[in-house]
Amino acid sequence: MNTWASKSSFFLVICLGLLMGMRQEMQENYSAIEGLHQDIFSVSCAIPACHDGSFEPDFRTVQSSYWTLVYHPITKNNKAGDFKYRVIPFDTAQSVLYERITNCCFVNENDRMPFTVGIPLPQKHIDAISDWIMEGAPDPIGQIHEIPQEELSFQSLTWGIPDTEAPLNGYSQQKDQALLPATIIPANERVRLNVVLERGEETITQLDILEFRFSTKPKNFQQAIAKPGIVDSGVGYIDIETNEFPQHQPIYVQVHAQDGKEVVEYPQKGTYVYERTRWAFFIE
């Protein structure tokens, strides 16, 4: 019995030693997303009212840390606009995460991260983050991801006079006790709607479908008037006759595009009412 107990104690000590060694190795293996989260992000960054889910990057978990860093678009850039993503695998120079923890003055003086009035992370932590990025910023199961395909988006709905460079200027006006920041258009005019088409650095010259939809209801385009648009060097446009639409009420515009399997519409269901009215016009 004593011999059995002695052997059990011996094996228990061995197992505990192995576990402690593994634990120490994990703690020292910073250059993996689990180690970075455990020893750096969760301790120095995921503090209340900061990167605890209050705003991104979200450092609450390993998964949220990874997916709000790697190839995730930035929300704040430097004055030169040098950066696009928070982390770009194999490239610390273009990863804003690395810039924020090494540059004292990214936008303002003493805005180095973590936000402790310019006090930097320990150098071993900075090196660990650098190593992880330069090793490809692998995810929790060790996979290295490629840059995702840029999505098509619409920007800057503007109005103009067809076949000229002259803009058609709109203004905000009070209508029915509601602020309507829609473009005011005279009746019996021919005008052009322009929308900028964006997909990263690509200049879009062709789409399978481009439609401009017109509705008197801001959230319902199922029975809208749909007209085909034209794509030309990154701009989609359509010429309309204002006498085709009812006067003295807002006409809401939705742009619909399809390119292969990609289908994009704007405004969408969750778009704020104020933004919907910016994509609208009012005929007087």
Image: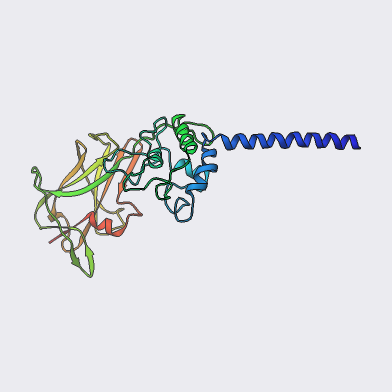
Judge whether 227 appears above or below 30 on screen.
below
Query: What colouring does the structure picture have?
Result: rainbow
- Quadrant position of the N terminus in the picture: top right
- Quadrant position of the C terminus in the picture: bottom left
Total residue callouts: 0
Q: Residue furthest bottom?
A: 177
Q: Position of residue 71 (x, y in %)?
A: 40, 38
Is 128 displayed left or right of 216 in the figure? right
Nearer the observer, 245 or 44: 44
Q: Where is residue 264 in the image (x, y as percent from the top left)?
A: 32, 44
Q: Position of residue 119 (x, y in %)?
A: 43, 46
Nearer the observer, 187 or 173: 173
Is 47 displayed left or right of 168 in the figure? right
Q: Position of residue 83 (x, y in %)?
A: 32, 38
Is 45 displayed left or right of 155 in the figure? right
Is 235 displayed left or right of 112 in the figure? left
